[in-house]
Every structure is written in structure tokens, then in C-alpha cells.
Image (cartoon, rainbow, N blue to C red):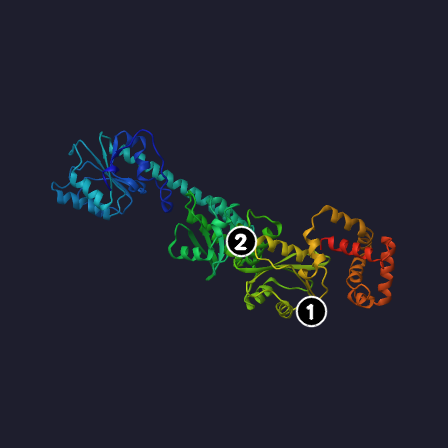
């Protein structure tokens, strides 16, 4: 420390928070700014960052060998009456106090010394020990009472805060709160981004302020691995129970918490571990992780494409220098794990998520990321059908190829909008169906929706009343114009029943199904109806 550290404390206190790990304890500065200490007109001779040291107790002594009686983090009050007479002894005294971990040495002038010994000041600078002098006589018992009251009050406040935090997260665990809710509560309590990550450093669930995704999640895997090694201001705690580790909770830098930031994060980890023990093998984390990636993408709930790209990359779905595809699988019972395993085997990455049933059949939406030099082709999709247990019963719709987040969002919507087109075991490439692609881009246009409603309302209402299949029959007829045998086969009906259905459709809609313009209008109306 240099001479610039010498300053006199004024009557205008400046509050400095203690270190995060010892947030419940007052710092040297905070104690010196207490009215009891200010009455002694304290002056800092050696300070700077040393004044931020927390103080766990205040001790008074005149002995030169007091260091051996101390345990560290004390503020030592002394008048120096029994200090050594020589500079070497004074230097050794200060060195022993610094080695013992004393937070600060406070010397009251007037009894033995009228000015602070130069050897003490120099040794304090050399050994990094905060040194304060009191210019006015103060009863030490007054100082210790004031300081200890503050220390104990802080510790009691910390204990209450820990109890409150424990109560909150125990309640979450007992109620079976989902993992994303626990992470959200952690982020709220800590006032900082919190991420639940896998053992492979993939961001499964990230609670990040809107607009901060790119800054928080960018290059996540590398930064996370570095934080596991050296901290770097991040807090990392494992989530494990009964000898099994499932992942890690990571909290980025934020304000101090009365209960201690690490304690808060540990309580969250306990709640998550209890949730996993009660999960029954459903792997709730994986489902929530998929939802936290795909739901914002489908709904457009992201501030910028860069923010969404950072979220995808952190979740293990690379975007940079990749080709992205939206796929929709209808029918059968494909699992997200099956689809993602297939992608890994093909040198790609994917996130798959079941969405509400469409047209009476289950639908799974897939975001697929492939290397830029390996575009998706028929052979790759065929391998997906072979991999899935129910591949023969699943119709697959493939959205157009995308190179960025915005285009990938469009590709996902294209696949979902056309998911009812392919029959079981078939594949529809939207890119190869120009009309489907055009209508997908206009899917929210009210005029298009109005056209579909006006054209199809009679058969839609008929199907709803009778649990009928007229829409499916019309779709098959329009998919195979001029070939009623193929159309009947696609509708899974005999030719005679198929013709009866067509006659009923023609009557209900009051149209000529052989007219080319009518067929086009009906085709557009069917495609305009959200699958």
C-alpha cells in the first residue's frame, strides 16, 4: 500500500458489502463507520481493499504475543502499552498478526504513543494488514459492544435468511415443482442468471433475462468447463443424491444474498435432486430441456435471432455453419430419445418434442441440425423411418432447408402446417411442393383462413357431428386427381364407399368435384386449415 491509502473517515458513511462467502459479517469499513468508532476519530493508515475484509470478532489486547491466541478475521484493539520497544520487535508483532489472519489492527493514541510507530506502519504495508489509529480516547468496551452487536445481528439475519430459503425450496420439492420452476425461483432469489446443465455441459434449462441470452449462453460449453476448473466468479454446485450425479446448477455473478449465494444454490440443488428421485424414470429434465428450446422457437419468443442461436448452441444444437430442418412426424409412437439417437448416429444433432394432437394423431416436431456439407436427403429420412419402431405407421413432413434461426422457425412451421399431408410411411418434402410452401408462408393471413372456412365449413361440421372422415376423403381425392383407385386406397376405403363419400361431399359443398378450378380452391382450403 502507498501513502495514498492514508485518509480520515468523515461523518458520511459509505456502505461496502462484505465478501460473498462471508456476507453475514460486517467489513472493517462498516465497523469503522459505526458511531462508536467514529467517536474516536479513526484514521486509516493502511487500507484500500484490505478494509473490505470481514470481521467475525473484536479482540482487545496489549500483549506482543497475542497472535497465537487468535484464529483469524478478528479486529484487534490496542493502546500498545506492552508492545516491544525496538523496531524489530514491532515488525515481528505486525507480521505475526498478518500471518494469523487478523482483519485489522486499531491503535489508540494517547496512552503510550502520540504518533503511530513508523516501524508498525511500514510493516503493515509490507504484510498487507489494515492499520487504523484512533486520535481520541474511547472506552474499548463501547467499541466491542457495538461491534459484537452488529456481528451477531448479521449472523442472526443470515440464519433467518437460510431458514427462509430452506423453507421455500423444501416446499417446492414436496409439491413436486418441475425443474424449470425451481431454476426460475433460484434466478429470482439470486438476482442473476441460473442454468441447469447436463454432465456434458449442455444448458438444459436456462433462466436468463430477455435480451441477455447471447451474452449469458454464448460459447456456453467452453465457458462452463472453465468455470468448473477455476470459478471465474461463477458458482457451480452438483445435483446428486444416493451416489448418482445428474448435472450441475450454475449461477452467474450477482448481488450478495443474506443466506449466502452458495447456500441458496445448494438448496435448489437439493430440491432438484429430490425431484429426480421421485421422477420414476420419466426423465423430466430432458422433456423440459426440449421444451425450453423448441417452445420459444416455435412461438417466436426470443429477442433476437442471435439470442435464440445462443440458446440452441448452449443446449447442444449447433447453428453456426450448419443446415437446419424442421420435421413433423405424425402417427405411431416415436420417442424424442429415438429421434435424437438417430440424429447422433447420423452425425447430426436434434431436439424433438411431442405437441398437441393434430387431426386425431400424435405429432412430434423435430429441429434437426446437420453439418453444412451434409444436407438432408431421402436416404437420411429413410434411415429415420427404419430406426423408429413405428416407422411404417409414421408420416414425415420435412420443412425447407435453413441456414439461420429465422429460416429454421419457418421450416418448423412449414412441417407442422403440412403434417396431415403424407400418409403413414410416406414423406412429404415441403420444398418439393410449391403450393404447400406458398400457403405455409401465408398461414396467418385472415383472407386465406376465411377462404378455408367458407369452402369447407359444411363437411367440417358434418365430420364433427358424425365423427366422419369427409375431410380425409377429400384430401385423398385431391392428392390423386384422375386416379380414383389410388385415391380410394389412400383413404383406406373401397371404391364404392369412396364414391359415396365424394357424392356426399359434392352435395354438402354444392360444387362440381370434376372442375379444375374448384379442385384448386378446395386444395388451397384444405392446406390453409392448420393441421
Give the camera-side residue of 261 and 476.
Answer: 476
- Which residue is rendered at x = 80% and y = 51% of the image? 455
Mark 1 residue crowding within 10 angstroms, few (<14) / some (14–19) / many (20+): some
- Front position among marks 2 and 1: 2
Residue 155 picture location, percent across and down: 37, 41
Q: Quadrant of the N terminus?
A: top left
Q: Could you tell me if the residues under marks 2 and 1 are in contact, i.e. CB atoms within 8 Å?
A: no
Residue 171 picture location, percent across and down: 52, 48
Residue 83 picture location, percent across and down: 15, 40
Q: Secondary structure at mark 2?
A: helix
Name which of mark 2 and mark 1 comes first in the sequence.
Answer: 2
Q: Secondary structure at mark 1?
A: helix
Residue carrying label 2: 309
Q: Is residue 163 above or below residue 134?
A: below
Residue carrying label 1: 392
The answer to which quarter of the image holds residue 352 is: bottom right
The answer to which quarter of the image holds residue 521 is: bottom right
Q: Kindly report the distance in space between the C-alpha atoms of the residues bearing marks 2 and 1.
A: 34 Å
Residue 222 picture location, percent across and down: 44, 57
Q: Quadrant of the C terminus?
A: bottom right
Give the camera-side residue of 363 and 482.
Answer: 482
Is residue 47 something that shows in the picture? yes
Give the camera-side residue of 294 and 335.
Answer: 294
Amino acid at each position: 500500500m502507498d501513502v495514498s491509502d492514508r485518509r480520515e473517515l468523515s461523518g458520511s458513511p459509505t456502505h461496502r458489502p462484505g465478501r460473498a462467502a462471508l456476507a453475514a459479517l460486517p467489513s472493517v469499513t462498516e465497523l469503522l463507520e459505526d458511531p462508536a468508532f467514529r467517536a474516536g476519530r479513526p484514521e486509516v493508515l493502511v487500507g484500500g481493499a484490505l478494509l473490505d475484509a470481514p470481521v467475525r470478532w473484536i479482540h482487545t489486547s496489549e500483549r506482543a504475543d497475542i497472535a497465537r491466541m487468535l484464529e483469524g478475521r478478528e479486529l484487534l484493539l490496542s493502546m500498545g502499552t506492552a508492545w516491544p520497544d525496538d523496531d524489530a520487535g514491532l515488525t515481528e508483532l505486525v507480521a505475526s498478526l498478518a500471518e494469523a489472519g487478523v482483519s485489522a489492527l486499531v491503535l489508540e493514541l494517547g496512552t503510550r504513543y502520540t504518533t503511530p510507530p513508523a516501524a508498525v506502519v511500514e510493516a503493515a504495508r509490507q504484510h498487507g494488514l489494515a492499520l487504523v489509529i484512533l486520535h481520541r480516547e474511547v472506552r474499548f468496551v463501547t467499541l466491542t459492544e457495538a461491534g459484537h452487536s452488529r456481528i451477531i445481528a448479521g449472523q442472526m439475519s443470515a440464519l433467518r435468511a437460510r431458514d427462509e430459503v430452506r423453507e421455500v425450496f423444501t416446499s417446492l420439492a414436496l409439491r413436486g415443482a418441475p425443474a424449470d420452476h425451481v431454476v426460475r425461483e433460484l434466478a429470482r432469489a439470486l438476482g442473476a442468471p441460473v442454468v441447469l446443465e447436463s454432465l456434458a455441459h449442455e444448458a438444459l434449462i436456462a433462466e436468463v433475462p430477455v435480451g441477455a441470452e447471447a451474452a449469458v449462453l454464448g460459447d456456453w460449453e467452453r465457458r462452463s468447463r472453465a468455470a468448473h476448473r477455476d470459478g471465474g466468479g461463477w458458482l457451480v454446485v452438483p445435483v446428486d443424491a444416493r451416489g448418482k450425479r445428474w448435472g450441475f446448477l450454475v449461477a452467474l455473478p450477482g448481488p450478495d444474498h443474506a443466506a449466502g449465494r452458495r447456500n441458496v444454490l445448494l438448496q435448489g440443488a437439493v430440491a432438484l435432486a429430490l425431484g429426480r428421485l421421485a421422477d420414476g424414470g420419466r426423465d423430466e429434465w430432458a422433456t423440459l430441456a426440449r421444451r425450453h428450446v423448441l417452445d420459444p422457437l416455435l412461438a417466436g419468443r426470443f429477442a433476437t435471432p442471435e439470442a435464440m442461436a445462443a440458446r440452441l448452441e448452449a443446449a447442444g444444437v449447433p447453428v453456426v455453419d450448419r443446415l437446419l430442418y424442421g420435421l413433423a412426424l405424425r402417427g405411431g409412437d416415436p420417442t424424442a430419445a429415438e429421434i435424437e439417437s438417430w440424429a447422433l448416429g447420423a452425425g447430426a444433432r436434434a431436439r424433438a418434442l411431442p405437441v398437441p394432437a393434430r387431426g386425431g394423431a400424435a405429432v412430434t416436431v423435430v429441429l434437426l441440425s446437420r453439418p453444412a456439407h451434409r444436407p438432408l436427403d431421402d436416404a437420411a429420412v429413410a434411415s429415420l423411418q427404419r430406426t423408429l419402431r413405428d416407422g411404417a405407421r409414421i408420416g414425415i413432413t420435412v420443412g425447407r432447408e435453413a441456414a439461420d434461426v429465422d429460416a429454421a422457425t419457418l421450416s418448423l412451421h412449414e412441417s407442422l402446417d403440412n403434417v396431415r399431408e403424407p400418409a403413414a410411411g410416406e414423406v412429404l418434402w415441403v420444398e418439393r411442393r410449391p403450393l404447400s410452401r406458398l400457403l405455409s408462408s401465408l398461414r396467418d393471413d385472415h383472407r386465406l383462413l376465411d377462404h378455408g372456412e367458407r369452402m369447407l365449413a359444411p363437411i367440417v361440421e358434418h365430420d364433427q357431428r358424425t365423427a366422419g372422415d369427409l375431410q380425409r376423403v377429400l384430401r385423398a381425392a385431391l392428392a390423386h386427381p384422375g386416379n380414383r383407385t389410388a385415391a380410394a386406397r389412400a383413404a383406406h376405403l373401397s371404391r364404392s364407399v369412396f364414391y359415396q363419400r365424394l357424392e356426399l361431399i359434392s352435395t354438402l359443398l354444392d360444387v362440381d368435384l370434376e372442375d379444375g378450378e374448384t379442385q384448386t380452391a378446395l386444395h388451397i382450403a384444405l392446406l390453409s386449415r392448420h393441421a
